[in-house]
Image (cartoon, rainbow, N blue to C red):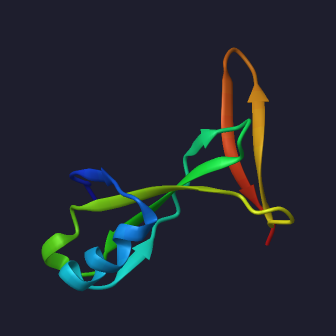
Amino acid sequence: MEWGDTYDVDIKQLPAIRRALGRLTKTNSHPVQNTRKNEIWVVLRTTDEQFKHIQFRYKTKLPKGAKCRIVTAKERHSTRQLICEA
């Protein structure tokens, strides 16, 4: 499935987006924004087929005691991933 545009939004804008476009669901994608600050992007998409090509993302911090953590793997280059416990 191809995705179109991704819009960076503030979490306070989500209710207005939901009213305009309907229900939003999280994707499995949580790109790491800043490892020092424990920040990740939460990516949302609409459930309405008409707007399925639109995604929204907002930045948030991982709370203390979260089931997920940011892991840095170093090989030829560094990669950062969000790892969650089941």
**Residue 21 in the figure: left or right of residue 14:** left
Q: x, y percentage for residue 2?
A: 25, 54
80, above or below 49, in the image? above
Given the current orientation, which residue lies at the most extreme top position? 76
Q: Residue furthest right?
A: 65
Q: Is residue 27 left or right of residue 18?
A: right
Q: Residue at x 59, y 50 (%)?
A: 40
Q: Residue 57 lies in what quarter of the image? A: bottom left
Q: Nearer the viewer, residue 39 or 82?
A: 39
Quadrant where the N terminus lies?
Answer: bottom left
Q: Give the residue drawn at x 40%, y 67%.
A: 44
| Image x and y of residue 6, in percent | 29, 52
**Location of residue 84 in the rendering, given as x and y in whole percent from the top left corner:** 75, 62
23 left or right of 28? left
Along the viewing direction, whichever of 80 and 16 lies nearer the viewer: 16
Q: Quadrant of residue 55?
A: bottom left
Q: Which residue is farthest front?
A: 12
Q: Is residue 86 above or below residue 31?
A: below
Could you say which quadrant of the image residue 22 lies in?
Answer: bottom left
* Percent of width and height locating residue 86: 79, 72
Q: Residue at x 76, y 34 (%)?
A: 72
Q: Residue at 74% across / 36% down in the picture? A: 36
Q: Is residue 50 above or below residue 39?
A: below
